[in-house]
């Protein structure tokens, strides 16, 4: 019988933003492959629901309320993960927020700062403290959630585009800095995914028409369609893969089109 390269039995996986959407789907995916899952999120109710979903399937999960934009909060998340499950093998840095479309000339400065604080600084802080532990261990795998907006410009989405381009830059830098420590770092670049965060836009008929025009598959993705890529990148099957960004976008980036053009 062939070895199951996606077996995460006896491994501890950290997922930020696991209260819903992609983070919840990936948390369940890891748990179904035997992982002990720690969820770091500000949404206590949603995260506890994810934990209960995992436990109902006889999996192991633990929630730690976490502000990814706060250094001490992230440090405490890593410490709690190690305390509860004895280590940290993989991390999916997925927490992030969106903003309403605005042209740069009219963009609200506070909104710009908030998006970069969560989406970019939050990823940096998670990497910082995850890597401190993994370097000592001499092994690990990390996946950061970027976006197709980290690969292509998107009118009206200046803060999000800037943050996700930054996440890809952080991913590449972390990969080359830590390759000799046995740590791999990659990025996921989802296209349009139907989640609670994108619900308002998903219900917009005009926006949906743009999605269908931009993506050759003519639809947005479900959160579960991101799971395979994340598990693969954290698994031994991807042992020679690091510093890369993987678009899971229905071929959207091949055509060079994003739904919102300003």
Image (cartoon, rainbow, N blue to C red):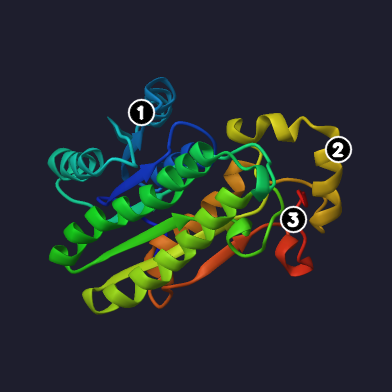
The quarter holding residue 207 reads: top right
Residue on which disc 1 sits: 55
The quarter holding residue 171 reads: bottom left
Disc 1: CA contacts within 10 A as few (<14), some (14-19) or many (>=20): some
Image: 56 above or below 216: above
Do residues under tags 1 and 2 come within 8 Å of each other at their CB atoms? no
**Residue 132 horizontal/vertical position (percent):** 18, 60
Q: Relative to residue 3, is residue 75 drawn left or right? A: left
Q: Which mark is residue 258?
A: 3
Badge 2 element: helix
Task: Pick the residue in front: 202 or 218.
Answer: 202
The quarter holding residue 141 reads: bottom left
Q: Which residue is painted at 32% across and 35% down in the image?
A: 67
Q: Is residue 238 visible?
A: yes
Badge 3 element: loop
Label whose residue precedes the other's in the sequence (1 or 2)? 1
Image: 224 above or below 53: below
Image: 52 above or below 195: above
**Residue 140 horizontal/vertical position (percent):** 27, 63
């Amino acid at each position: 019988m062939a070895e199951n390269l996606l077996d995460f039995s006896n491994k501890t996986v950290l997922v930020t933003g696991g209260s819903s959407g992609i983070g919840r789907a990936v948390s369940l995916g890891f748990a179904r492959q035997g992982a002990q899952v720690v969820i770091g999120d500000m949404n206590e109710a949603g995260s506890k629901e994810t934990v209960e979903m995992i436990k109902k399937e006889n999996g192991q999960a633990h929630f730690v309320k976490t502000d990814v934009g706060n250094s001490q909060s992230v440090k405490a998340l890593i410490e709690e993960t190690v305390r509860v499950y004895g280590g940290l093998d993989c991390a999916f840095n997925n927490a992030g927020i969106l903003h309403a479309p605005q042209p740069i000339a009219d963009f609200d400065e506070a909104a710009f700062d908030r998006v970069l604080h969560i989406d970019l600084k939050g990823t940096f802080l998670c990497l910082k403290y995850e890597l401190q532990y993994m370097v000592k261990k001499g092994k690990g795998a990390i996946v950061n959630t970027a976006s197709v907006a980290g690969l292509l410009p998107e009118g009206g989405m200046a803060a999000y585009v800037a943050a996700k381009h930054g996440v890809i830059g952080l991913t590449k830098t972390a990969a080359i800095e830590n390759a000799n420590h046995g740590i791999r770092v990659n990025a996921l670049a989802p296209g349009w995914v139907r989640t609670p965060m994108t619900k308002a836009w998903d219900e917009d008929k005009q926006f949906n028409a743009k999605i269908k025009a931009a993506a050759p598959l003519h639809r947005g993705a479900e959160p579960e369609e991101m799971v395979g890529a994340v598990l693969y990148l954290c698994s031994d099957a991807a042992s020679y893969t690091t510093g890369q960004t993987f678009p899971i976008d229905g071929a959207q980036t091949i055509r060079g089109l994003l739904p919102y053009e300003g």
